Image (spheres, grey):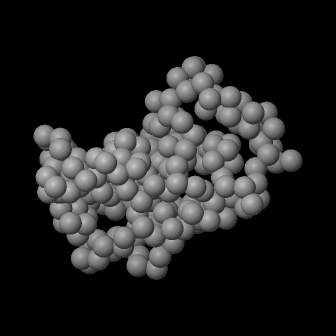
C-alpha cells in the first residue's frame, strides 16, 4: 500500500466530473498505484525540470497546469491523463530542451503516443498523437487562434506543417479522437503561467491507474 499526505481544497472537488470524483476519492483513500506507472513519474521528476520551450515554466509545470485545468473542467479520466502526459515525447529523446530553435521538429506527439502505448490505450494515446494536428486545425478553423499562440508555438507550427488546408481540416474533423485532441490543445495553450500553484504529480496517479491497460 502506498500512501501520502495531501492538502485537498474540497471546494475544487465540486467542479470534478462525477465518475472522476469517484475515482479521485477511491485513490485518495486507498492510493493503490500499479508499480508499472512509477517510471512515468520518474521521467517527470527528472526530465520534467527541462524548460518548456520559450516560456517561463518547466515541462512538469506545464503538464500539471494542463491536467489541473482538465480536472476542474470535469473531464473524464482519460483526457485528464492525456493532458498530463501529452508532451512526454519531449522528455524521452536526446535532442535537447528546444530542438525547434535549431529547426528540428522532434515529432514529440508521435514519440510520446508510441511511448505511452506501453501503459495506456487509445483513449489516452490518441489525443496525445493528435494534439499537434489539433493546433494546425485550429489555426485553419478558428479566427484569431493563430495570433493567440505563444512565440514557441508559432515557431514550432512552421516546422509542423503550418495551418491545415481546408481539405486537411475536413479530414481531421472525421478522425477518431478529434474532439479530445482539440480540447487537450486548448488546455495545452493555457498551461504556461509561471508561478501558478498546482497539485503535485502524485495527485493524478489515481487517474493514471484507472486508465492504465492491465497486464
Q: Residue furthest right?
A: 1
Q: Quadrant of the C terminus?
A: bottom right
Residue at 40% over, 50% down:
176
Q: Is 136 left, or right, of 45 in this rendering?
A: left
Q: Nearer the viewer, residue 97 or 2?
A: 2
Q: Is 21 left, or right, of 112 in this rendering?
A: right
Position in image of residue 70 (x %, y %):
47, 37
Residue 30 position (above or below residue 110): above
Residue at 37% over, 42% down:
179
**Where is residue 78, by image quadrant?**
top right
Q: Is 48 left, or right, of 102 in this rendering?
A: right
Q: Number of labelled discs?
A: 0
Position in image of residue 26 (x %, y %):
75, 33
**Where is residue 163, by image quadrant?**
bottom left
Residue 130 position (above or below residue 93): above
- Can residue 62 be seen here? The reply is no
Position in image of residue 47 (x %, y %):
53, 67
Q: Is 101 left, or right, of 82 in this rendering?
A: left
**Where is residue 180, by image quadrant?**
top left
- Can residue 152 be seen here? The reply is yes
Position in image of residue 92 (x %, y %):
51, 72
Residue at 57% over, 20% down:
14
Residue at 62% over, 29% down:
19
Amino acid at each position: 500500500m502506498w500512501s501520502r499526505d495531501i492538502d485537498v481544497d474540497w471546494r475544487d472537488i465540486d467542479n470534478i466530473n462525477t465518475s472522476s470524483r469517484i475515482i479521485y476519492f477511491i485513490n485518495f483513500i486507498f492510493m493503490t498505484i500499479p508499480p508499472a506507472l512509477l517510471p512515468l513519474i520518474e521521467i517527470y521528476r527528472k526530465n520534467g525540470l527541462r524548460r518548456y520551450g520559450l516560456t517561463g515554466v518547466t515541462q512538469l509545470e506545464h503538464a500539471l497546469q494542463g491536467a489541473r485545468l482538465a480536472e476542474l473542467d470535469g473531464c473524464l479520466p482519460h483526457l485528464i491523463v492525456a493532458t498530463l502526459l501529452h508532451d512526454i515525447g519531449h522528455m524521452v529523446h536526446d535532442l535537447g530542451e528546444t530542438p525547434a530553435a535549431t529547426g528540428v521538429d522532434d515529432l514529440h506527439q508521435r514519440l510520446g503516443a508510441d511511448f505511452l502505448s506501453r501503459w495506456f490505450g487509445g483513449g489516452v494515446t490518441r489525443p496525445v498523437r493528435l494534439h499537434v494536428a489539433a493546433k494546425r486545425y485550429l489555426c485553419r478553423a478558428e479566427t484569431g487562434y493563430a495570433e493567440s499562440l505563444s512565440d514557441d508555438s508559432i515557431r514550432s507550427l512552421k516546422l509542423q506543417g503550418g495551418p491545415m488546408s481546408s481539405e486537411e481540416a475536413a479530414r481531421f474533423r472525421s478522425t477518431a479522437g478529434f474532439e479530445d485532441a482539440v480540447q487537450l490543445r486548448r488546455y495545452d495553450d493555457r498551461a504556461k503561467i509561471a508561478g501558478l500553484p498546482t497539485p503535485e504529480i502524485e495527485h493524478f496517479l489515481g487517474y493514471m491507474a484507472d486508465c492504465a491497460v492491465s497486464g
